[in-house]
């Protein structure tokens, strides 16, 4: 036990990690007594590190005037101070290791009674007081005597408490500082939130002690044998009844001729016990081997592909004080959406989360609690990662990560931290990991030369760059030797596809690269969940706060809302799209039949059933099942089409792969893959306009009867977060500079012909001579109003793609229902449409909206063959494409969406605004990363498209 300094002085400004805590260790459920100390504690908040300065730690201190605060919890989420968000920049001067005098400091008191049967005395062991997470620096007293102090917010610290424990009543006092030297190591792109946010427990530790243990459970894929050895500090006994091991010496090594390996797909765990003296620990052992061979990361002999996400801990009300039910919800949502890997950005999660990963099956990159990103804006001067004064703190953090988590089979890689520049301390951390746990590779993205890590890792690389890396032909970095070495390493994208707002776009093309090049072992989408904080308005509205909403003088706005889940854990369209892209079963056409590809890393397809349905115009006409031969992982099978009845309208065969039986993470029938094959095309439309009564003279009146307003040419969309990406090179910047948000319309001419009305217009922004010439030709076709729109750019439009190209019109507010045949059910965009399928869908106008935390373009339905917009009385508008169009329907305009900063600012107007589009610009991920690929850009070019308008058909007759 490190000595306590006589006078801790400003310990919270000491770069050293702390004093008084015992060595970090692994823990497991134990028969030894434990006393949880969670619950309401007495609490007060002071503005400076001195706290109340009135001896609050003394047992006889009168705290009856204090309030209560839940432990675990963050004081800012319980009415003391407020949350603050910055991404890269520190919210205090970069003056390491010092922090401002304004240093909110929480003092906690908790009185507890030691259970009467608590073992006592020198022969019966020790008692430790354990803190699983305190942000950012704390000092602890038991019965008035200091036990120590610590930094490392998301790391466990244990203090010897036994000598000070009293029979009966005991008083625990903890002083927590919001800012400390440790804060410089915790610049992790999240809300700054303080307090005792994970559990506190008193743990009895019997003698002989099982204080630490290290399970080594290897698997030989060539023989199916396992080897098991458990390191312990002293003599102990190990039992794994299922493997015939009873009370054996844990050191072994025990050769087990046949074990079932652990993998994320088949997370086989063996229950075991480890005993010494009176104490027995419950272990769950997973056998697996990790190897980097020929430049490829293999588990149990197989290349694996990370279909991953970066997970911050987040609960909208409790912040990072995440309960087990929420952790389980995360794991289930991940598994249900085919995610197989988690990077624990940017700190070790609550240990229960790793237990769930072991149990349900998720590969884990376990990241150390370290990020010094805020030194980048000051040119990395005095970066703690490269300053010897901080070496102990860096090593202490790495040790606490590895020692706590080393027995989880789910943990495949150790990550040194995130965005901490370069430095000797990082190298020392890597060396320590290699020495302590040679079985696991080390990850750190910041080491671009990959000199001291075992995998090459990058973030937000473009598709082109990833492609070059796949060919092991990436740009040279440091020395030729470093290049040669790096090119022998496997590659992963530790962050990509920034899921901020509407997006990410371009996932499919990344996945294609991962599947094409062996070296590319997948990646981790940034990030899992929006860290929004709910706000309830007086009018009953609910929206989510982000940076700046608490009056922070320095903040990074809604960059905190960049997840695949909305803050309430509703999947966003981005997650639905990701699930479709990474689905482990892919179904598509092959020759005259279909191909079913097994993209699992390990599993065959025996656990699935395959069902098909034939739909004509989106209505089912026949269905059945397929029987499959054996399809091992990584292979595919071609099947003939089933016998299908003849169809006449546009018909599609949809084939779905479903869980045949329930799994711990999903019920039977859960979909793990889907594909559609066109069977019969749409019947050709009668191309010639038929004179269906009435003359072209009637056309203006008919147009006025159908629409409240418009239709007219429209190119603007409420910019997405990705449109905003890239500073003054952003799409939004260029769009606004050009004036695409303020186009003016001029009618050039109006010509009434024998059977048509031609309206020529010129649509252009102020202060430029660029224009879009738009010709509207109205005619009549089989009782419908037909519009042929021709758009021609005038001038040089090559500088910037258009946001959209289409029409805007308005319908009465009574319109509430939407039915369509096309892609759905969710929104889709040119580079995010894998999740959408052809079918017939119905919704309400309100349900078509996607509530991105920051309002922006959303809800686009593309590939629409026809759509009907109706009120309760069935009146409204039917639109048919020739062949297709995209639409949105909203109770507000794109300008309203653009102006709103929170969803509660969007209020229904007196009309329903429709957009009917020829195209939209792709989404890309430029909020952090590349924009839309060229093939998904909406370049201005001459365009003609046709829509047919009529009143809705009667519903049954559709
Ligand atoms: C990257 C960070 O690693 C991550 O924590 C997050 O902030 C992300 O950006 C954006 O949301 S670093 C960035 C400079 C590429």
Image (cartoon, rainbow, N blue to C red):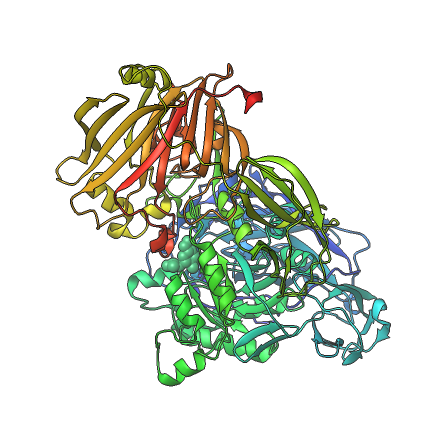
The quarter of the image holding the C terminus is top right
Does residue 367 appear to the left or right of 812 in the view shown?
Answer: right
Q: Position of residue 283 (x, y in %)?
A: 75, 64
User: What residue is drawn where x is 56% and y is 73%?
Assistant: 297
Q: Quadrant of residue 720?
A: top left
As drawn, 898 above or below 732: above
User: What residue is drawn where x is 47% and y is 78%?
Assistant: 452
As drawn, 582 above or below 772: below
User: What residue is drawn where x is 68% and y is 65%?
Assistant: 632
- Between 190 and 773, the one lying in front of the other is 773
- Between 277 and 118, the one lying in front of the other is 277
Q: Position of residue 451 (x, y in %)?
A: 44, 79
| Ligand 1 placement by image quarter | bottom left
Does residue 640 appear to the left or right of 207 in the view shown?
Answer: left
Q: Position of residue 330 (x, y in %)?
A: 60, 49
As drawn, 366 above or below 247: above
Any part of residue 47 in sight:
no
The quarter of the image holding the N terminus is bottom right
As drawn, 409 above or below 806: below
**Outermost residue toward the bottom?**
481
Q: Position of residue 718 (x, y in %)?
A: 34, 37
Total numbered badges shown on the rendered structure: 0
Any part of residue 489 in sight:
yes
């Amino acid at each position: 036990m490190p000595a306590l300094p006589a006078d801790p002085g400003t310990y919270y400004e000491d770069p050293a990690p702390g004093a008084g805590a015992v060595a970090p260790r692994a823990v497991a459920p134990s028969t030894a007594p434990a006393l949880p100390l969670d619950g309401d504690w007495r609490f007060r908040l002071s503005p400076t590190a001195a706290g109340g300065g009135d001896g609050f730690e003394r047992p006889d201190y009168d705290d009856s005037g204090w309030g209560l605060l839940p432990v675990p919890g963050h004081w800012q989420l319980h009415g003391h101070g407020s949350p603050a968000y910055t991404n890269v920049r520190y919210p205090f001067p970069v003056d390491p290791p010092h922090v401002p005098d304004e240093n909110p400091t929480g003092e906690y008191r908790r009185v507890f009674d030691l259970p009467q049967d608590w073992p006592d005395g020198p022969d019966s062991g020790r008692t430790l007081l354990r803190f699983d997470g305190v942000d950012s620096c704390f000092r602890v007293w038991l019965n008035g005597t200091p036990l120590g102090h610590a930094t490392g917010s998301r790391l466990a610290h244990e203090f010897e408490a036994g000598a000070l424990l009293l029979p009966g009543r005991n008083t625990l006092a903890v002083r927590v500082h919001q800012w400390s030297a440790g804060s410089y190591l915790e610049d992790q792109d999240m809300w700054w939130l303080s307090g005792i946010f994970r559990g506190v427990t008193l743990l009895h530790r019997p003698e002989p002690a099982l204080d630490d243990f290290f399970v080594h459970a290897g698997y030989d894929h060539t023989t199916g044998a396992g080897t098991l050895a458990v390191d312990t500090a002293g003599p102990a006994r190990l039992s794994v009844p299922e493997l015939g091991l009873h009370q054996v010496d844990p050191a072994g090594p025990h050769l087990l001729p046949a074990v079932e390996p652990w993998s994320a797909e088949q997370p086989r765990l063996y229950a075991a016990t480890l005993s010494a003296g009176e104490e027995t620990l419950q272990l769950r052992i997973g056998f697996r081997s990790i190897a980097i061979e020929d430049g490829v990361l293999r588990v149990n002999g197989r290349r694996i592909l990370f279909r991953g996400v970066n997970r911050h801990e987040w609960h909208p009300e409790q912040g990072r004080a995440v309960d087990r039910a929420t952790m389980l919800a995360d794991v289930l949502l991940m598994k249900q959406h085919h995610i197989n890997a988690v990077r624990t950005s940017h700190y070790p999660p609550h240990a229960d989360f790793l237990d769930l990963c072991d149990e349900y099956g998720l590969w884990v990159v376990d990241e150390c609690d370290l990020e010094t990103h805020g030194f980048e804006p000051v040119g990395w001067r005095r970066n703690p990662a490269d300053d010897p004064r901080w070496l102990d703190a860096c090593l202490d953090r790495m040790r606490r990560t590895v020692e706590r988590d080393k027995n989880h089979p789910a943990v495949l890689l150790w990550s040194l931290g995130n965005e901490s520049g370069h430095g000797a301390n990082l190298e020392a951390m890597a060396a320590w990991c290699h020495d302590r746990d040679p079985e696991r590779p080390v990850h750190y993205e910041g080491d671009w030369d990959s000199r001291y890590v075992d995998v090459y890792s990058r973030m937000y690389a473009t598709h082109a760059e990833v492609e070059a890396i796949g060919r092991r032909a990436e740009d040279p970095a440091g020395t030729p030797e470093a290049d040669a070495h790096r090119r022998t390493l496997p590659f992963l994208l530790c962050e990509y596809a920034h899921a901020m707002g509407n997006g990410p776009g371009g996932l499919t093309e990344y996945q294609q690269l991962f599947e094409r090049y062996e070296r590319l072992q997948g990646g981790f989408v940034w990030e899992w969940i929006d860290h929004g904080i709910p706000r309830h308005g007086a009018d009953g509205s609910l929206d989510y706060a982000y940076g700046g909403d608490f009056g922070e003088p320095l903040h990074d706005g809604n960059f905190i809302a960049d997840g695949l889940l909305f803050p309430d854990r509703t999947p966003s369209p981005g997650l639905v799209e990701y699930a479709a892209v990474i689905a482990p079963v892919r179904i598509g056409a092959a020759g005259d039949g279909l191909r079913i590809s097994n993209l699992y890393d390990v599993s065959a397809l025996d656990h699935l059933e395959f069902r098909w349905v034939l739909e004509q115009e989106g209505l089912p006409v026949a269905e059945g099942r397929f029987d499959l031969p054996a399809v091992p992982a990584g292979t595919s099978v071609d099947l003939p089409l089933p016998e299908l009845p003849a169809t006449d309208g546009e018909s599609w065969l949809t084939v779905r792969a479903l869980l045949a039986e329930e799994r711990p993470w999903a019920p039977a029938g859960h979909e793990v893959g889907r594909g559609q094959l066109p069977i019969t095309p749409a019947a050709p439309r009668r191309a010639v306009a038929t004179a269906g009564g009435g003359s072209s003279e009637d056309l203006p009146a008919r147009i006025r009867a159908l629409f409240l307003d418009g239709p007219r040419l429209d190119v603007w969309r409420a910019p997405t977060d990705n449109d905003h990406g890239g500073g003054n090179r952003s799409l939004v910047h260029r769009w606004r500079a050009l004036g695409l948000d303020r186009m003016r319309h001029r009618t050039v001419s109006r010509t009434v012909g024998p059977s048509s009305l031609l309206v020529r217009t010129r649509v252009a922004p102020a202060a430029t001579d660029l224009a879009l010439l738009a010709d509207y030709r109205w005619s009549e076709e089989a009782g419908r109003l037909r519009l042929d729109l021709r758009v021609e750019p005038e001038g040089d439009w090559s500088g910037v793609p258009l946001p959209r190209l289409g029409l805007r019109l308005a319908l009465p507010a009574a319109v509430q229902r939407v039915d369509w045949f096309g892609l759905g059910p969710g929104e889709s965009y040119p580079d995010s449409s894998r999740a959408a399928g052809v079918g017939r869908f119905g919704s309400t106008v309100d349900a078509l909206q996607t509530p991105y935390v920051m309002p922006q373009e959303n809800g686009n339905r593309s590939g629409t063959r026809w759509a009907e917009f109706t009120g309760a009385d069935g009146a409204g508008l039917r639109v048919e494409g020739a062949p297709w169009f995209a639409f949105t329907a909203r109770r507000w305009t794109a300008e309203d969406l653009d102006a709103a900063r929170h969803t509660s600012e969007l209020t229904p107007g007196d009309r329903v605004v429709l957009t009917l589009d020829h195209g939209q610009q792709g989404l890309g991920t430029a909020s952090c990363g590349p924009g839309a690929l060229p093939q998904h850009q909406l370049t201005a070019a001459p365009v003609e498209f046709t829509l047919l308008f009529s009143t809705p058909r009667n519903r049954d007759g559709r």
